[in-house]
Image (cartoon, rainbow, N blue to C red):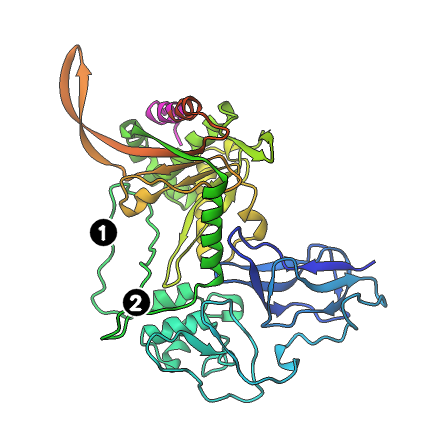
């Protein structure tokens, strides 16, 4: 019996994906877990493995086609077996589909690869506020695949087709990604000023503020919400409607951690190739405390309370550019890692999220979530719970503050490195005292940290 190749869930806020490239032809042998095609969305690009060994019987979704999660993309089976979804003669190229006139589609959708036999003239509506692009306009002047999103960014940034062809691409087969183009544009700007450092002294992601160009004289610009943004809208509302959100706030003193960090950060960076950040310490503290507070490392499933033995820590990662977003890659078994392991995992996941190289199974299964808006200067945040978790911890900006301390029975004013952290929790399961006990444990773990990285 033939096995289906299914469009996977590429993230909690993704409802569809685009077939970028098939790596196998119908009739070719494949091994189980061997990559057979490349899938792309506005947030992720991932290679999809074969569900079984055999031959690729058919390609049911051509390159360039965008389909919903769960769609059957093709079949793998025994040699000579008939494909349930086709005759096995489907071409990989979208150009073999019935010829239709170019259709304007929103540029915020996943890349399309429907290429004409000959280069067609540009069909871009130049009206102010119009964000539509001809579907066939999917290549650069040199014939390199360019997604509609990259094309729009290039136009808004004043990058010509000739310049776009010179942008080094890090995507599949040299494809220019949004990150590639934005980095190239930044490097071309003379006198560009580096972003100021934040007191957290961490590796701060260079996330660009989203912006929409409003024509002179216009009162507003209307553009359709992208698939990613629609999913985020739905998920945020659904979380608020599902969980009884409550937040509690605690001060935490980082002075002791800072002494340890400063003493070891240079050697740590030389040994591991990644920075020893405050986020790494917090991730370690949270992971340790979750083992002692089972009601926070849990899930509500219908009317059942599900308590998890595994600690899978979700790490919120911001995606930059004119169409911003958020993904939550997961560090599996975070409680079993030391500082070095956590630092490598956090750096690796964040980098692959922004490069759209994260794997689908790395975006699911979290039991608790950590986010750090303090990296961007926020004093504190009250984030929405990442379903089906019952808790999310936010770190505020870490900065020097005057604090009243008692020394030998006398009150003195001292300068300490402090921040505010918050816990958003689902009051259906987590009571206030339970939440505060967990937070007090996190604070104590940070303030009494003694382990050398």
Compared with residue 208, is residue 345 higher up or lower down, i.e. above or below? above
- Residue 411 percent coordinates (x, y): 14, 16
Q: Callout 1: few (<14), some (14-19), or many (20+) C-alpha neighbours within 10 Å?
A: few
The answer to whether residue 328 is visible is no
| Helix, strand or loop for disc 2 | helix
Instruction: Name the image quarter holding the C terminus.
Output: top left
Q: Which one is in front, 10 or 409?
A: 10
Viewer-proximal residue among 348 and 16: 16
Q: What residue is pinned by disc 2? A: 187
- What is the spatial separation of the Cα atoms under label 1 and label 2, in whole angstroms? 17 Å
Q: Does the magenta run of residues contain 442?
A: yes
Q: Position of residue 115 (x, y in %)?
A: 56, 81
Q: Is residue 321 above or below residue 393?
A: below
Q: Which of pointers 1 and 2 lies earlier in the amino acid sequence?
A: 2
Residue numbers of the magenta segment: 440-453
**Which residue lies most toward the right here?**
80
Q: Which mark is residue 196?
A: 1
In this orientation, does residue 412 appear?
Answer: yes
Mark 1 or mark 2, whichever is nearer to me? 1
Q: Residue at x 47, y 82 (%)?
A: 142
Q: Residues within 10 Å of mark 2 (few under 14, many from 20)?
A: few
Res. 133 image quadrant: bottom left
Indicate the quadrant containing the N terminus: top left, top right, bottom left or bottom right. bottom right
Residue at point 53% right, 70% down?
173
| Residue at x 51%, y 43% (from the top left corner) | 330
| Residue 405 image position (x, y, % from top left) | 19, 19
Is 350 located above or below residue 83 in the figure?
A: above
Q: Quadrant of residue 371?
A: top left
Q: How many marks do you count on the picture?
A: 2
**Residue 282 covered by magenta stretch:** no
Q: Is residue 16 left or right of residue 76?
A: left
């Amino acid at each position: 019996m033939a096995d289906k190749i299914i469009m996977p869930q590429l993230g909690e806020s993704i409802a569809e994906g685009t077939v970028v490239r098939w790596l196998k032809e119908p009739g070719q042998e494949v091994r189980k877990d061997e990559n057979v095609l490349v899938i792309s969305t506005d947030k992720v690009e991932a290679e999809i493995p074969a569900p079984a060994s055999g031959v690729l019987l058919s390609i049911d979704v051509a390159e360039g086609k965008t389909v919903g999660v769960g769609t059957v993309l093709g079949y793998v089976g025994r040699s000579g077996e008939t494909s349930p979804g086709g005759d096995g003669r489907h071409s990989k190229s979208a150009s073999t589909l019935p010829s239709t006139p170019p259709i304007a589609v929103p540029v915020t959708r996943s890349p399309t690869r429907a290429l004409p036999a000959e280069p067609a003239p540009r069909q871009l509506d130049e009206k102010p506020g119009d964000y539509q692009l001809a579907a066939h306009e999917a290549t650069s002047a040199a014939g390199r695949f360019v997604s509609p999103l990259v094309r729009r960014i290039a136009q808004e940034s004043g990058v010509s087709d000739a310049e776009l062809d010179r942008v080094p691409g890090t995507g599949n087969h040299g494809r220019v990604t949004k990150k590639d183009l934005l980095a190239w544009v930044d490097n071309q700007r003379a006198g560009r000023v580096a972003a100021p450092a934040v007191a957290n002294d961490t590796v701060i992601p260079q996330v660009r503020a989203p912006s929409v160009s409003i024509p002179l004289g216009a009162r507003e610009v209307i553009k359709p919400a992208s698939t990613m943004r629609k999913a985020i809208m739905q998920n945020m509302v659904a979380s608020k409607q599902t969980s009884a959100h409550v937040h509690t706030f605690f001060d935490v003193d980082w002075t002791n951690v800072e002494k340890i960090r400063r003493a070891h950060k240079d050697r740590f960076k030389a040994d591991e190739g990644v920075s020893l950040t405050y986020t790494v310490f917090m991730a370690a503290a949270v992971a340790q405390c979750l083992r002692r507070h089972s009601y926070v490392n849990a899930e509500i499933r219908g009317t059942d309370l599900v308590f998890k033995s595994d600690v899978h820590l979700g790490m919120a990662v911001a995606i930059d550019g004119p169409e911003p977003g958020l993904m939550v890659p997961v560090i599996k078994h975070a409680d079993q890692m030391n500082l070095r392991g956590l630092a490598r995992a956090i750096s690796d996941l964040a980098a692959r999220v922004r490069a759209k190289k994260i794997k689908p199974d790395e975006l699911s299964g979290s039991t608790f979530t950590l986010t750090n808006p303090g990296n961007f200067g926020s004093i504190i945040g009250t984030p929405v719970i990442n379903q089906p978790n019952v808790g999310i911890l936010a770190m505020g900006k870490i900065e020097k503050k005057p604090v009243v301390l008692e020394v030998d029975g006398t009150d003195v004013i001292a300068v300490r490195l402090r921040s505010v952290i918050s816990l958003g929790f689902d009051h259906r399961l987590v009571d206030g005292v339970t939440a505060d006990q967990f937070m007090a444990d996190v604070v104590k773990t940070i303030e009494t940290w003694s382990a050398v990285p």
